[in-house]
Structure formats: C-alpha cells, structure tokens
Amino acid sequence: MSHDPYELLGVDREADADTIKKAYRKLARQLHPDVNPDPESQERFKQVTAAYEVLSDPQKRAAFDRGGDMFGGAGFGGQGAGFSFTDIMDAFFGGAGGGQQAGRGPRPRVRRGQDALIRLEVELAEAAFGVSRELKVDTAVRCSTCSGEGTAPGTHPVPCETCHGMGEVAHVQRSFLGEIRTLRPCAACRGFGTIIPDPCRECAGDGRVRSRRTLTVKIPAGVDNGTRVQLSEQGEVGPGGGPAGDLYVEIHVAPHEMFERHGNDLHCTVSVPMTAAALGTTLHLPTLEADLESGADSGVETSFELGVPPGTQSGHQVVLRGRGVPGLRGGRGDLAVTVAVETPSRLDPRQEELLRELAAIRGEEQPTGDVRPPHKSVFGRLRDAFTAH
C-alpha cells in the first residue's frame, strides 16, 4: 500500500482543498466499514482517512511536500494524534459535526407568538363601503403578575447546574473510529440554560395567560369574500412574554336580497309586467347605499331611475357605470340591471277578452313561431366554409 497521500486519494499535487475533500468523501463512502466490512476495505479506509488528515491540514501537507513521512511519527488509530471523528464529519458536512463543533447554545425563553385568525361576517354594503367593527378575541396575553418573565414576584431564573447555562450537554460514544462526541439539549433545563425555581402561579412559568379582549377593526371599502385584514401584533403573545404575532380578520360577505356581486360589479334582476314592457315605463330602484344607516342623512343617493323603453324584451340588460362596488385600489365597478318580463298566468274573462282582441288586431291568433337555427361557434362557421368549397 502506498504511503503517498496524493496517490491514496487519487489527486494530483496541485489539487485544492475542495478537490481533496470531494475525493476523500467519494472513497470514504465506498470503503466505510458499514458498507464494506472486510478487513482489506477497513485497512484501506484507515489509510485513506490518514491521507486526508495530512492533505486537509496545510501544515502537515507542507511538511509532506518537503519530504516528510505521511504518518510523521504521529501514527494512526491510537498512535499519537491520529485522525478524529471531527475530521470525517468536516469532510462530509463542511465542519457541521464532531466534538470540536461549537454548540447552538441555550434556547431563548422569549419567542415571538403565533398569528391568529378569526372570521367576520359583514353585509354587502359594509364590504363595499367599509365599516368599523368591535371584535371580542380570546388570545394569549402577557402575564401581568410576572410581566412575562415566568417567575414568582421577587425571583429570577437561575443558571442550570447540569449544563452550566449552556443549554446542551455532551454525550460521548466509543467506536473503532475513536470517541464520538455529540451535543444534545439539556434535559434538566429543556435546553434553556436556566431553571425557574419558583414559577409564577398565574401563568405557571409560561409568561402568558389567556384573556378575552375587545378590539376595533376597520374594514376597508371594497373587501370581498376571503379578504384578510391584518392587525399587526394583535395575535398570540409568545412564550416568555415574547412579542405578539399578527391577527388576521377573514371577511365573509352575507348574501344580499337584491344585489349579487361579481368582482367589483353588481348584478340584479327586476321584473316588469308584460304591458309595462310593451308600453315602456320608468322604475325607481334602491342603490346599495340605501343599506347604509347614514345613507339618507349624508346626502348619498339611495335610489335611481331606470327607464324601460317600449318593446323591451325579457333578458334586456341596462348597465349603469360607476354604481358598483369601490375597488380596494380605487375606481368603482358597474351595476348591471337585467329586465325580466312577466307573462300573466291567470286572466279573468275581461282580461282574456281584451288580449284576444289585441291578438286579432296584430294578427297573432295563430302564431307559427319564429324558428331560428342555433348559434354556431367560430369553429362551426369555419367548418361550414370549408365544406362549401
């Protein structure tokens, strides 16, 4: 077996640190005893690891390049300094493991709280023009007895004697590679590094309690179903009395008896008698502003006139610009009014006589019906055009 670390790793003498690490990582995966338990592979794994120890250390690499021995009197596997599990972990994870890794330290007791979500139902007019509502919310708030510290009045957290305030303790295991040293959260203090000897009786050491409080939320004009209004720092207070999360108010708009919303447009259908549709008429209809309590007092127009021209057919639609719902970013939608012509289902003798007389005058006693071909799509018309040729 060669004692040249460059030959063992399969790299040239000008290889940089990344190339050496990649070469070692590849060989270590192939030769690791967990993969190849035969003695020859184990011995080669030791040689490859020793070669990586030399070439990954600038001083040892320089000494070898000057003609020194690969082992340099510091044998392998228990002879002298040798390699450590940290070296292997560094090669695989870039310094992310091993006994010499600095721990994460104690966990902070004070942490940000979670966001909260509540649902609020509003009327269509309130969603369109905005409204202020008072909400009762049940969330965690900072404990007033201990001011969020979690300790009884006059006391404070003390350093953990098990981990000495580090929040972590070392666990050592022995293997054929040597001692494997890992850090785990301290069980005595749950990783906080401190212990509360005398917890606050009000919050049991959590630094927060649940409480019902009243908030005023301002719903902006133009919100729709599913819109969420954010109230910063009005959510759950965090552990240890930490800063509160945000409160989100999700809007649900109740159905309206007259108007139906499509985006920022409003749609409604009005019914008119057959005679009114034939002769023409003017309808007086309420606007959405009529639902507001302050509509009439503030001078807002709460009704409008809709002209139905003579001969209006059922399904005729009139669009009134700018009478819809205000947009969240400005502007306002339209109001589309669809006319539905009502045909009388019951007639008294006199009414029937008059209608028969009208039918006779118009020559409509025996209508033949106006049969029209179905509407063809663009593709249907194109197909007909090609067929004709």
Image (tube, helix red, strand yellow):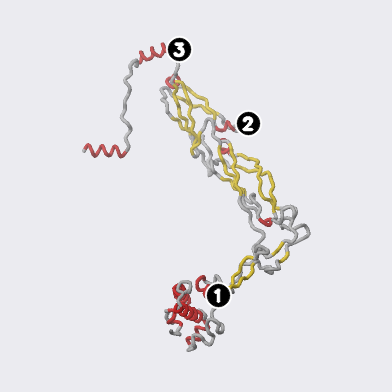
The quadrant where residue 4 appears: bottom left
The residue furthest left is: 389
Determine whether 221 is above or below 306 in the image.
below
Q: Is residue 263 visible?
A: yes
Q: Residue at x 22, y 36 (%)?
A: 388
The amino acid sitting under disc 2 is: Asp
Q: Residues within 10 Å of mark 1 (few under 14, many from 20)?
A: few
Q: CA distance from mark 2 to mark 3?
A: 46 Å
The amino acid sitting under disc 1 is: Ser
The label shown at residue 378 is: none
Determine whether 382 is above or below 95 in the image.
above
Q: Secondary structure at mark 2?
A: loop
Sooner in the amino-acid sequence: mark 3 or mark 1: 1
Q: Residue at x 53, y 79 (%)?
A: 83
The label shown at residue 175 is: 1
Q: Which residue is mark 2?
A: 297
Sooner in the amino-acid sequence: mark 2 or mark 3: 2
Q: Viewed as shown, does residue 132 lie left or right of 39? A: right
Determine whether 370 is above or below 27 in the image.
above
Q: Secondary structure at mark 3?
A: loop
Residue 11, position in %: x, y? 42, 79
Residue 157, position in %: x, y? 73, 62
Residue 254, position in %: x, y? 56, 36
Sooner in the amino-acid sequence: mark 1 or mark 2: 1
The label shown at residue 348 is: 3
Q: Viewed as shown, does residue 209 lie left or right of 68? A: right
Q: CA distance from mark 1 to mark 2?
A: 86 Å
The quadrant where residue 251 appears: top right
Location of the N terminus by quadrant is: bottom left
